[in-house]
Image: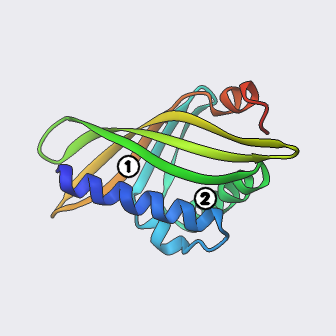
């Protein structure tokens, strides 16, 4: 399980960086996720299918990140909490770097907790839980 999840988040980081550079392959991005996904944050709970609408939402998300100056997303650490032989929570520590006008770049560390399923050696995200991203960005003068 650890090797499959590690490989998943290495791809996740690489694809996020490509998206920040405006070079996203949305089919490859979508392949990180299961057929259905759920997300929870202080903004609410969302669920849906991994379909064309999901890809459009992801494109909009990447566009938003670029518009607020996100330059880089770096994977710092992944820790697993196994649930059973096919499922775990991946506690992922990220570091985002933001460009700011007339100021040095700002780096922000944050965690996201991903629900991951591993079938036939392949890991896919089927959900995530995150903190209040907007409040964190505002606290650092971004957005």
Circle 2 packing at 10 Å, graded few (<14), some (14-19), many (20+), is some
Residue drawn at point x = 42 percent, y = 54 percent: 36
Reply above or below: 86 against 32: above
Is 36 on the left or on the right of 45, as rendered? left
| Residue 24 % position (x, y) | 58, 71
54 or 115: nearer the eye? 115
Identify residue for label 1.
Answer: 126
Residue drawn at point x = 36 percent, y = 41 percent: 77
| Residue 57 % position (x, y) | 64, 57
Q: Quadrant of residue 8?
A: bottom left
Identify residue for label 2.
Answer: 58
124 or 53: nearer the eye? 124
19 or 99: nearer the eye? 99
Q: Secondary structure at mark 2?
A: helix
| Residue 85 % position (x, y) | 11, 45
Is 67 on the left or on the right of 117, as rendered? right
Residue drawn at point x = 53 percent, y = 42 percent: 95
Looking at the image, tell me whether mark 1 or mark 2 is earlier in sequence order. Answer: 2
Reply above or below: 122 against 116: below
Q: Quadrant of the C terminus?
A: top right
Whether label 1 touches label 2, CB < 8 Å? no
Q: CA distance from mark 1 to mark 2?
A: 15 Å
Reply above or below: 47 against 32: above
Residue drawn at point x = 17 percent, y = 62 percent: 121
**Outermost residue, right direction?**
102
84 or 12: nearer the eye? 12
Mark linked to residue 68: none
- Looking at the picture, the colour scheme in use is rainbow
Picture mark count: 2
Q: Secondary structure at mark 1?
A: strand
Circle 1 packing at 10 Å, graded few (<14), some (14-19), many (20+), is many
């Amino acid at each position: 399980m650890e090797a499959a999840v590690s490989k998943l988040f290495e791809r996740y980081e690489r694809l996020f960086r490509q998206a920040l550079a405006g070079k996203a392959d949305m089919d490859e991005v979508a392949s990180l996720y299961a057929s259905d996904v759920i997300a929870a944050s202080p903004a609410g709970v969302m669920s849906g299918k991994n379909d064309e609408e999901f890809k459009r939402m992801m494109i909009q998300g990447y566009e938003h990140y670029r518009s607020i100056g996100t330059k880089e997303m770096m994977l710092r650490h992944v820790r697993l909490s196994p649930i059973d032989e096919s499922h775990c929570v991946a506690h992922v520590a990220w570091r985002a770097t933001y460009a700011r006008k007339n100021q040095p770049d700002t780096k922000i560390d944050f965690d996201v907790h991903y629900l991951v399923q591993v079938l036939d050696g392949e890991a896919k995200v089927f959900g995530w839980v995150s903190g209040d991203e907007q409040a964190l960005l505002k606290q650092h003068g971004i957005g």
